[in-house]
Amino acid sequence: MLAAISQWEKSCIVQKLRASRVRIRKTKGKCEGRKPFGESTEESAVIKRIQTLRIEGKTIKAIADCLNAENVPTQAKVRAGTVAKWHPTMISRILNR
């Protein structure tokens, strides 16, 4: 008997969560997952720096090396306080957005 009630309760919770995700997607466009790099003002300044370096003709690896030399924080460093380095893949993904 308790198993049946538990299953019913779980299905109600799933329906509520699904409905709220749909509602948020309609208003904001995205509701799940990590926020893309560039949401905060600190991060948007880093994106502008990356774009400036790319316009100057630097390669993606050179941009990553430059940001590491300048100790520019990555998304992981900003949000979790961990030490992380810039990699060319990260730069490429930011530029392709």
Image (cartoon, rainbow, N blue to C red):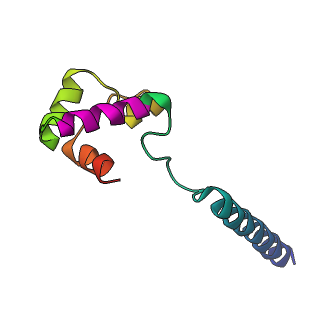
Vertical arrangement, residue 61 with respect to residue 6, above or below: above
Vertical arrangement, residue 31 with respect to residue 84, above or below: below
* Image quadrant containing the N terminus: bottom right
Q: Nearer the viewer, residue 84 or 64?
A: 64
Figure label count: 0
User: Could you tell me if residue 42 is visible in this image?
Assistant: yes
Left or right, residue 44 beside residue 18: left
Image quadrant in which you'd find residue 90: top left
Q: Position of residue 74 (x, y in %)?
A: 35, 33
Dominant secondary structure of the magenta stretch? helix
Vertical arrangement, residue 85 with respect to residue 5, above or below: above
The residue that appears at 16% across and 43% down in the rendered structure is 60
Image quadrant in which you'd find residue 30: bottom right
Q: Is residue 7 magenta?
A: no
Q: Nearer the viewer, residue 35 or 47?
A: 47
The residue that appears at 23% across and 48% down in the rendered structure is 89
Left or right, residue 34 beside residue 31: left
Left or right, residue 11 beside residue 5: left
The extreme front residue here reads 55
User: Could you tell me if residue 85 is visible in this image?
Assistant: no
The residue that appears at 27% across and 21% down in the rendered structure is 71
Q: Position of residue 3 (x, y in %)?
A: 80, 75
Q: Position of residue 41 (x, y in %)?
A: 48, 29
Q: Is residue 53 magenta?
A: yes
Q: Give the residues drawn in magenta, as a range.
A: 43-55
